[in-house]
Every structure is written in C-alpha cells, then in structure tokens.
Amino acid sequence: MTNHTPRVFSGVKPSGGLQLGNYLGAIKRFVDMQGQDFEAIFCVVDLHAITVWQDPKELKAATREVTAGYLAAGIDPAKSVLFNQSQVPAHAELAWLFNCVARVGWMNRMTQFKDKAGKNAEKVSLGLYAYPALMAADILLYHATHVPVGEDQKQHVELTRDIAAKFNHDYGAEGFFPLPEPIIDGPATRVMNLRDGSKKMSKSGESDMERINMTDDADTIAKKFKKARTDPEPLPDTLEGLKGRPEARNLVDIYAGLSETSPEAVITEFAGAGWGKFKPALADLAVEKLGPISEEMARLMNDTVEIDRVLAQGAEKAEAIAQPILDQTYDIMGFLRSRKG
Ligand code: TYM
C-alpha cells in the first residue's frame, strides 16, 4: 500500500474570473506537466467557491469560464482528467470524514483563513473555516502524490499531509493515503498586485487596475502595465539589485513567467533599461501570449454544450478513480456498508 504511483491533482476556484496569477502560478504549469509520465487530474473546485456567497445565476458561468481557461491554455481532456468538483459527490463525503480527522488547532493556524476572515471571523461561513479539509479530500480522494500550486496554497498542501498521516496512523492503515508534495516552481508562483507589490494579485482585489484578467483585451493589458506602480530606478544588472524593490521584481518575474525564462535572464536582457522601455516590452509579450488564450476562451464560452460535455465526461473518469478509494476509506473506518455490490 505504500508505493503510490505518481499522480498529479490541482484545482482552481470558479469565483470571479481568472487572473494572471492563476495562469502563471497554476494553469500554465499544469499544461507544462501534462503528457509526462503520470496521470493528471484538474478540477474546477466549485464547492470551494461557495465558502463565500456566489450568485446562483453566475456560478455556472464562472465554472464554464474556468473550464474554458484550462482548455484554451492547453489542457487536453484526452490526456488529463478535467471536471468540476460538485459532479463527483465523493469530494464532499471524504471532506466530512476529514473534518473528523483534522484538529481545530490545525485549522486555527491557516493564514489564508485569517486573511480572508479578518476581523469578521464570527460572521464568515463555517465552510470557509473547514475549506482546507475539503482541499485535502480533493487531493487524497485520488491518492495524488504531487500538487502543483502557487505559493499561497503551500500551507494547505502541508495540512493535507498532516491529515493523511493522522488518518493512516489513527486507523492503522500505514501508507493508505500518500503524503502529497506541493510543487511550487518557476519564476511566477507568487504574482503580486500591480498597484501594491506587498499584496498578492487576486480576483477579489478592489480595483481592476491591480490585476490582469485572462479576458482583458490588448489595450487594457497595455494600459494596466503602463500604470503599474514602479520606482524611479532603471532595472539593475543583477537580481540582487532588485532587493527591496517588490514592484520591479514582480514585473521581472511576470516577464520571466510569460517568456519561459528565468528572472536572471530577463535582468541580463534589460540591464539598465528604464520603465519606458521595459513596460511596453512586457505589455507586448503579455498580449502575444495571452491574446490567443483569451480569444479561444471567448470562442469556447459560446459553446457551452461542448464545455458541459467535457466536464461530464471528466467527472465520469474522475469518479472511476475516486469511488473505490472512498469505499476503501469507509471500510478502513469501520462503516457498515451492506448496500455495496
Ligand atoms: P485559487 O482558485 O485561489 O487559485 C488557483 C491556483 O492559482 C494560484 N494563484 C496564484 N499563483 C501565483 N500568483 C498569484 N497571485 C496567484 N493567485 C492564485 C493558486 O496558488 C492556485 O494554485 N484552494 C485552492 C483551490 C483548490 C486546490 C485543491 C488546489 C481546491 N482544492 C486541491 C490544489 C489541490 C484555491 O483557492 O486556489
């Protein structure tokens, strides 16, 4: 039971649209991993979205938009399993079992909950607090061994390891759940807000100028990079020279992510350049790389029948992997299962 075959799982929430951080920190990296020597499962995690109220009229559209983003970026449903979480009920079932494994003290340490709840902790949903146990269920339901995510999700993957280890130990099932590894690599695992280099780029930020949306047109992308906050200094000739310059570092990292090089290579290319040179180069690169993706997303969004078909088929494939693992989990815990075939 201890030798788990390599399997990748990751997910993106359909709350609001996709932003550049989701692309560079997650989806683009999923595409790069696809077709290698392991099975890959990618999910639109709609059950996670409702930890904060979502307009029922918009949830389906947001689910289709994230799916369109995956497909347009290059996720191929013939090579990877692609589905939305709520179509595989086993996620919610395993999450409940894990609510009874995870400890309140562990949840209290989750920095994302503290950030999101802020001073309002008494008023947020219980789901927002329990969210990391559902994320652990997403991953462990497939016995996934590798979880590519942006930097902000590292603590949740570490919690998943703790839940797996405690389950295995408490139920005398050593090695049943693997301890999955977070995969956080590349130059853009933490894309920052364009107006404030101390904050992460996110879809929920106050101003649209803070982020690049995957659906922005060329003019909007150019305008946002032109108005991005920077300092007056030109680019240095070594990466060291970007210390203490978070906004400058962020734009260099974004350039490296989009051009598939390293921040070092970007600095070598642009050493001594002022923003009047670098920002237009970055805008051009972003339009070149993101333009075809947003066009394809728009085309796919007009074909909801096809998107829904892909998700339905993906859910069948996902369930075929998940259900036996859930059944084994129930058995290990001692549930009476007389309906089972
Ligand atoms: P979510 O929907 O907030 O983000 C999806 C992915 O995008 C990454 N990301 C970023 N990366 C770099 N810079 C940014 N500014 C940035 N913003 C977002 C996130 O790190 C993430 O990889 N809880 C997860 C979704 C989830 C999940 C899972 C992920 C649910 N179950 C199981 C992996 C495995 C979330 O809210 O991601």
Image (spheres, rainbow, N blue to C red):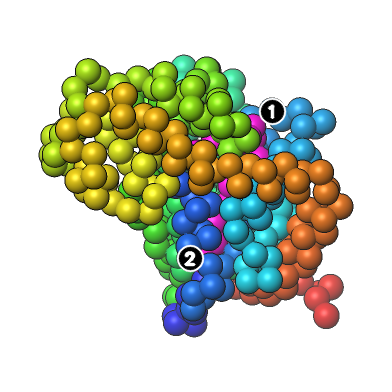
Residue 10 belongs to magenta span: yes
Against 160, is 5 above or below? below
Q: Amino acid at mark 2?
A: Met
Which residue, given by chain and number where applicable, does mark 2 sit on? Answer: 33
- Depth check: give the residue in front, 131 or 197: 197
Q: Which mark is residue 253?
A: none
Residue 93, image x and y in percent? Answer: 69, 56
Locate residue 202, reporting x and y percent.
50, 31
Q: Which quadrant of the view contains residue 281?
A: top left
How far apart, in angstroms, are the residues tagged by discs 2 and 1?
A: 33 Å
Q: Among all residues in the image, which is located at the extreme right? A: 305
- The answer to if 197 sits in the magenta stretch is no
Q: Which mark is residue 53?
A: 1
User: Which amino acid type is shown beneath numbered disc 1?
Assistant: Trp
Q: Earlier in the sequence, mark 2 or mark 1?
A: 2
What span is in magenta? 8-21
Determine whether, in the image, residue 270 is placed left or right of residue 60.
left
Q: Secondary structure at mark 1?
A: loop
Residue 57 quadrant: top right
